[in-house]
């Protein structure tokens, strides 16, 4: 007789290629059986979860999260950030090298980051390293220390702290790509062309034009496309694997896909805010909806949805970039407000709402975008990213018929601001499980103690993703 620690019975299970009603048996934090479990086998099971009328999906892997430790005090940290992620059905996140002080651009800074996360995160995580000017010699040691890849900015991040993360110049970008290519890891790029952005921003400031529309106009699609073009040229020269973060335009998507069709190793992500919000929402909501690249027009948003539906976008990530509320509220100058969106708690629900319920996109596509493809690209397979025997029991139970309105009190963020407050959704996360351990339920909220583990990327994993 099979023995299980936990059994999920009667759920509609979403696999990357199919959907079927079946049971899931879990033992010692792994999925050990998928199929029909007979009633007599449940008699010795410690925990039985009734998933009738619910869909069971692989937990989201959010490959783009900013949890601002160490060194930023009152900013979002691992406890609150991972709580919000768990409440949103996320079971693994990849933490970006900024905005902590120091940023994760040396092994020592990585160790400080990992120490801050110890006993502080409810779900599993990995760490990005950073590519910045003056720190090229630290790339190989960071790879050896187990970062999941490297991140660079092609435009100024905007943090005035002299210790903060800095954007790359052309020489640093090119040499950094050469070095990263030798490690077999991926370089993730914030692709906005700084000469265009800085010139247009300077013109707005000189003319005292500080409205949301002025901010949007200062970071046009042309800046995104120009940066993508330059990065692809450098990658072709160096052989560096690329991943473009938060792509906001179909034009950039098509350029990246053309490069892939020619044999380049390149992927891209977009974010729920580009698919659920427009520049009109920035006008209405204000600084809580400010991000970089900025929100685009409704027409451009529909083009991006077409890219999602056609399979041209590899993954969806939150780019959760929180800050103290004082940096978002009362801003009359949109250029001075913090440029990041707090959205990690609702990525899965927004994709189900906007993609499945409104646009009839297959749930199989949504689970690939949120879970399988991030796991594939960043070396987390076969343990994470899909529901399969032998994988970690990282999963989320969702109700696709439960309507609710997002309220400020629902937010687990340290600073409870979000552009989604007041938004009506018609689906809801009911329960999240990380390695077989329940970390969130709709009824009880966050459950238990933070027991998330770091996932260090070993050389063999990087080599696998290079193939």
Image (tube, rainbow, N blue to C red):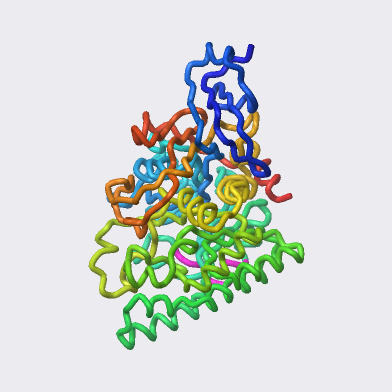
Q: Nearer the viewer, residue 137 or 163?
A: 163
Position in image of residue 264 (x %, y %)? 72, 62
Give me the residue at 58% from left, 27% from top. 24
Q: Nearer the viewer, residue 205 or 332?
A: 332
Query: 260 left or right of 366?
Result: right
Percent across and percent down for residue 206 are 33, 87
Q: Residue furthest bottom?
A: 207
In the rendered image, the vertical position of residue 214 relative to residue 252, given as above or below: below
- Give the x, y percent position of residue 365: 62, 50
Residue 418 falls inside the magenta stretch:
no
Q: Nearer the viewer, residue 99 or 245?
A: 245
**Rendered image quadrant of residue 464:** top right
Measuring 63% from the left and 28% from the top, which residue is drawn there?
Answer: 34
Quadrant containing the N terminus is top right
Q: Is residue 167 magenta?
A: yes
For the magenta stretch, what is the residue range? 166-174
Residue 70 lies, with reference to residue 24, above or below; the image says: below
- Residue pictured at 47% horizontal, 28% vertical: 437
In this picture, is 288 found above or below 203? Answer: above
Question: Can residue 19 be seen at all in this image of the molecule?
Answer: yes
Q: Quadrant of the rendered structure where residue 402 is?
A: top left
Give x and y (percent) for residue 242.
63, 60
């Amino acid at each position: 007789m099979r023995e299980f620690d936990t059994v999920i019975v009667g759920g509609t299970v979403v696999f990357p290629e199919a959907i079927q009603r079946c049971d899931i048996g879990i033992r010692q934090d792994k999925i050990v059986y998928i199929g029909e479990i007979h009633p007599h086998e449940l008699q010795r099971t410690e925990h039985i979860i009734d998933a009738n009328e619910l869909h069971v999906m692989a937990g989201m892997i959010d490959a783009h999260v900013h949890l601002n430790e160490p060194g930023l005090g009152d900013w979002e940290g691992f406890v609150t950030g991972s709580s919000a992620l768990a409440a949103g059905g996320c079971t693994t996140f990849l933490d970006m090298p900024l905005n902590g002080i120091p940023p994760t651009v040396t092994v020592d800074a990585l160790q400080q980051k990992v120490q801050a996360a110890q006993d502080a995160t409810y779900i599993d995580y990995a760490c990005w390293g950073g590519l910045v000017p003056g720190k090229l010699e630290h790339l190989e040691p960071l790879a050896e220390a187990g970062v999941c890849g490297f991140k660079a900015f092609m435009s100024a991040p905007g943090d005035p702290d002299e210790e903060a993360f800095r954007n790359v110049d052309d020489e640093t970008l090119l040499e950094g790509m050469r070095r990263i290519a030798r490690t077999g890891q991926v370089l993730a790029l914030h692709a906005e062309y700084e000469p265009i952005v800085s010139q247009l921003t300077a013109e707005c400031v000189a003319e005292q034009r500080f409205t949301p529309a002025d901010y949007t106009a200062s970071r046009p699609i042309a800046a995104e496309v120009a940066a993508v073009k330059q990065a692809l040229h450098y990658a072709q020269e160096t052989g560096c694997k690329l991943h473009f973060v938060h792509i906001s335009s179909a034009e950039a998507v098509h350029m990246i896909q053309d490069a892939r069709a020619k044999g380049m190793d390149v992927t891209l992500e977009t974010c729920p805010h580009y698919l659920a919000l427009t520049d009109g929402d920035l006008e209405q909501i204000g600084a809580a909806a400010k991000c970089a690249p900025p929100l685009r027009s409704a027409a451009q948003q529909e083009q991006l949805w077409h890219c999602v539906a056609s399979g041209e976008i590899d993954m969806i990530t939150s780019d959760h970039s929180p800050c103290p509320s004082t940096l978002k509220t009362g801003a009359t100058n949109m250029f001075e407000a913090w440029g990041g969106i707090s959205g990690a708690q609702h990525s899965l629900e927004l994709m189900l709402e906007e993609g499945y319920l409104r646009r009839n996109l297959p749930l199989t596509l949504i689970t690939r975008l949120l879970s399988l493809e991030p796991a594939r690209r960043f070396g987390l397979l076969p343990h994470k990213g899909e529901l399969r025997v032998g994988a970690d029991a990282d999963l989320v139970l969702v109700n696709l018929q439960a309507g609710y309105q997002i309220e400020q009190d629902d937010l687990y963020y340290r600073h409870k601001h979000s552009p989604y407050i007041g938004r009506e959704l018609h689906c809801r996360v009911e329960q999240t499980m990380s390695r077989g351990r329940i970390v969130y339920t709709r009824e009880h909220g966050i459950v238990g103690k933070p027991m998330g583990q770091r996932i260090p990327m070993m050389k063999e994993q990087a080599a696998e993703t290079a193939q």
